[in-house]
Amino acid sequence: MNKFSLFILLLFAQLTFAQEADIRRSIDTFFEGLHQKDTIKMKSVLAKPMVLHSVDERKDGAVFSVEYAAQFYRSVASVPKDFSFGEKLLSCKIQIDGSMAHAWTPYEFYVNGKLSHTGVNSFQLVKEGDKWMIVYCIDTRRKP
């Protein structure tokens, strides 16, 4: 009985690890598309409809904003080619329940090589077929 229990535990751990790797792959694809200003790549891992919220932490209080997918794609596509930006994820904590997942990713955001702001992304994902799709993201933003 102990060997069977150990086998089940190892199988469950392997499945969980594989699911987490697939979720991380979707998040990485999103950021690759963002950094390359490639909305088609981004759309490959973003569910329809998708919405983004931000909480800009300011000295005089937090400012909450919403951006819908169409607006977001236009914003990314309109970034000038000579303008560089990048988001560096510092870690990624994933929680899964069936076909729903949550990823918590602290980050640093750079503009033209200089630190612009820091914060945390909170991604909500759902599994559609065999692919994890981002349905929602909210982030915080703090000036250093």
Image (tube, helix red, strand yellow):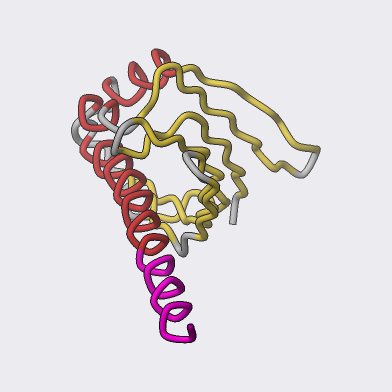
Query: Quick check: 144 left or right of 23?
Result: right
**Residue 34: which quarter of the image?**
top left
Magenta-drawn segment: 1-14
The reply to whether the magenta stretch includes residue 96 is no
**In the displayed structure, would residue 116 be above or below residue 90?**
above
Q: Residue at x 38, y 64 (%)?
A: 17
**Percent position of residue 83, x then y:** 27, 37
Q: Nearer the viewer, residue 111 or 12?
A: 12
**In the displayed structure, would residue 134 be above or below residue 86?**
above
Query: Quick check: 36 left or right of 107?
Result: left
Q: Residue at x 65, y 37 (%)?
A: 56
Query: Quick check: 55 left or right of 50?
Result: right
**Percent position of residue 128, x then y:** 36, 30
**Percent position of residue 141, x then y:** 59, 44
**In the displayed structure, would residue 128 be above or below residue 75?**
below
**Residue 66: which quarter of the image?**
top right
Of all residues shown, which one is farthest toward the top? 70
Q: Residue at x 47, y 38 (%)?
A: 125
Magenta: predominant secondary structure element?
helix
